[in-house]
Amino acid sequence: ERYSGGGYLIIQQLIEDISGSTFAAFVQKQIFDPLQMEHTTYSHYPDAELRMDIARGHEDNGKVDPKRKYNLYPEMAAAGPWTTPSDLARLIIAIHQASRGENKVLAGPKLIAQMLTPQLNAMGLGLNLKGADQVLGYWHAGNNAGYTGMLFAITGTGQGAVVLTNSNAGEYLALEAVRSIANAYNWPVMKTINEQPLENINAYLGLYKVGEKDALVFTQQKNQLYFNKAGSKTSYRLYKAEDGSFRMIEKPDNLSFTFNVDTAGIITGATMYENAGSVNIMTKSVY
């Protein structure tokens, strides 16, 4: 994935140049107010200026800065908004409705489709995309000093979850909460991998060619299946999932393998699904 906070500042300036309004006022009028996001603002001092209740941020060790309640960020588009889980959930609902032509506050279905289409690797327009062979969901996460949060949504149903924490160490808590929700509602992505037993691991080992130049090597380490790019010393463990695919724990939703067998049951190659649409057929050259 690629992300540029500075890129959002360019968009912020572009909006101000074209609209003749401040970025904060423009977004408030065009998005926050129409979507009834009543507790979302780009105000630098929402507690003092708007009398909003602000949870105090915490450091990794759980302590708070006794002299400062929160940091100020002049780069509004990249780091400036204050919001709540309920308000971000309203935004998820609006994106789903707009994709079906049912909400006129946001862009129309064509632009929403572009937002949810891979532009570079697994990045859409402003959103990170989930899914190996197709886009099944999207997410965005972020953190400022003392705060960490994540939103996630399923594209087909409009279901989603938002978790905001007032701690620098909240990333794993938020991720675990979203995965638990995905498990409970049987979402196609973000679920916890329930590892299945792997029999005859030797059958998977070998060099798999991807095109004419690239290759992946599948090896056995401590009775587990690993793979690495040919020539690289960094290897990743693969887990066999309930659907029969093989996934790595670091990117369980954006990279998966299925192994191809011939009529005799011998593995002859594999198919690699990556970044919501990229498919690579690999031929096993070493048996």
Image (cartoon, rainbow, N blue to C red):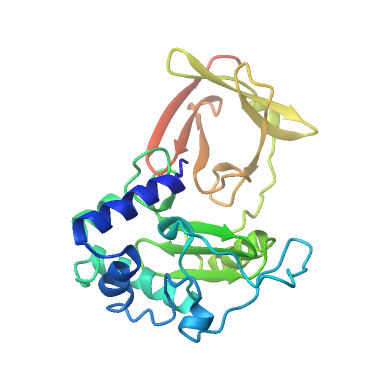
| Residue located 53% across and 19% down the image | 215
| Residue located 55% across and 84% down the image | 53
* Relative to 226, residue 10 above or below: below
Q: Residue farthest to the bottom?
A: 51
| Residue located 27% across and 78% down the image | 34
In this view of the protein, can residue 190 be seen by the observer?
Answer: no
Question: Which image quarter: residue 234?
Answer: top right
Q: Is residue 249 left or right of residue 214?
A: right
| Residue located 49% across and 76% down the image | 84
In this view of the protein, can residue 48 be seen by the observer?
Answer: yes
Q: Quadrant of the C terminus?
A: top right
Question: Which image quarter: residue 123?
Answer: top left
Q: Is residue 202 left or right of residue 175?
A: right
In the rendered image, residue 181, in percent from the top left (x then y), is placed at 56, 69
Quick one: 285 or 141, which is closer to the camera?
141
* Relative to 135, residue 198 above or below: above
In the rendered image, residue 222, in percent from the top left (x then y), is placed at 80, 33
Quick one: 10 or 172, which is closer to the camera?
10
Q: Is residue 184 left or right of residue 235?
A: left
In the rendered image, residue 208, in percent from the top left (x then y), is placed at 54, 20
Q: Is residue 232 left or right of residue 5?
A: right
In the rendered image, residue 78, in percent from the top left (x then y), is placed at 45, 55
